[in-house]
């Protein structure tokens, strides 16, 4: 699982760590990778260590290649409390990743649950875990949702957005 975002409270990465703590320990194939840094970086490092997740939750820090890393991941997780229109979700969609995201403004403009990813209510652990299990245990669903996400992201490509912006300026 992959996330991009500052290590701040609003991004809610701790929810993912807590929701999957037992599974991360017991499943040798499950990892949570986060690209980004922020004022909670030291807190997260300590929290991960205290919970025995040093090799399971990987903090990459700020990365210029964060988008390229998406191509080695199985799913994109976006647990934020609040967003506008999240560019990292659009980038993950364009990389063909299925999305698991909170049902908030911005996310629900991009994600159609069951079509190109899944939406869950903020901090709804049961639904989140169910969605993770669906993607972990069914490669066909993962591919289907990822393929649709990639198609849907095209709406936000430069080729499609630039003419609309130019029309607004006219």
Image (cartoon, helix red, strand yellow):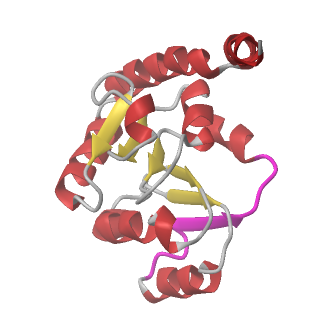
Residue 164 location in percent, x, y? Answer: 68, 13
Q: Quadrant of the C terminus?
A: top right
Q: Which residue occupies the foreground of this view, 9 or 4?
A: 9
Q: Residue furthest left?
A: 126
Residue 23 to residue 53: above or below: above
Relative vertical location of residue 56 with respect to residue 111 in this rendering, above or below: below
Q: Is residue 113 above or below residue 57?
A: above
94 relative to 127, above or below = above
Q: Which residues are magenta?
A: 52-65
Residue nearest the observer in this picture, 133 or 15: 15
Residue at x-position 79% and y-position 46%: 65
Where residue 99 sits: x, y (%)? Answer: 43, 37
Q: Residue at x 51, y 32 (%)?
A: 97
What main secondary structure does the magenta stretch of the protein show?
A: loop
Instruction: Confirm whether the magenta stretch covers residue 169.
Output: no
User: Magenta segment: does it hold 63?
Assistant: yes
* Residue located at (54% from left, 76% from top): 54
Q: Residue at x 60, y 16 (%)?
A: 154
Q: Work out which residue is located at the far front of the displayed protein and give it.
A: 170
Would residue 31 appear left or right of 15 to someone viewing this image? right
Image location of residue 74, percent across then percent down? 49, 38
Residue 162 sits in quarter: top right
- 66 to the left or right of 153: right
- Residue 27: name its quadrant: bottom left
The mark total stands at 0
């Amino acid at each position: 699982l992959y996330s991009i975002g500052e290590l701040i409270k609003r991004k809610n990465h701790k929810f993912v760590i807590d929701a999957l703590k037992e599974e991360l320990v017991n499943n040798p194939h499950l990892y949570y990778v986060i690209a980004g840094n922020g004022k909670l970086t030291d807190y997260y490092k300590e929290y991960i260590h205290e919970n025995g997740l040093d090799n399971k939750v990987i903090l990459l820090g700020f990365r210029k290649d964060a988008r390229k890393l998406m191509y080695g991941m199985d799913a994109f997780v976006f647990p934020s409390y609040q967003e506008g229109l999240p560019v990292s979700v659009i980038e993950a969609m364009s990389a063909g990743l299925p999305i698991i995201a909170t049902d908030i403004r911005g996310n629900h403009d991009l994600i159609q649950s069951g079509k190109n990813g899944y939406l869950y209510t903020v901090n709804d652990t049961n639904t989140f875990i169910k969605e993770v299990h669906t993607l972990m245990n069914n490669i066909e669903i993962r591919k289907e949702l990822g393929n649709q996400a990639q198609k849907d992201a095209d709406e936000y490509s430069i080729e499609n957005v630039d003419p609309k912006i130019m029309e607004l300026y006219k």
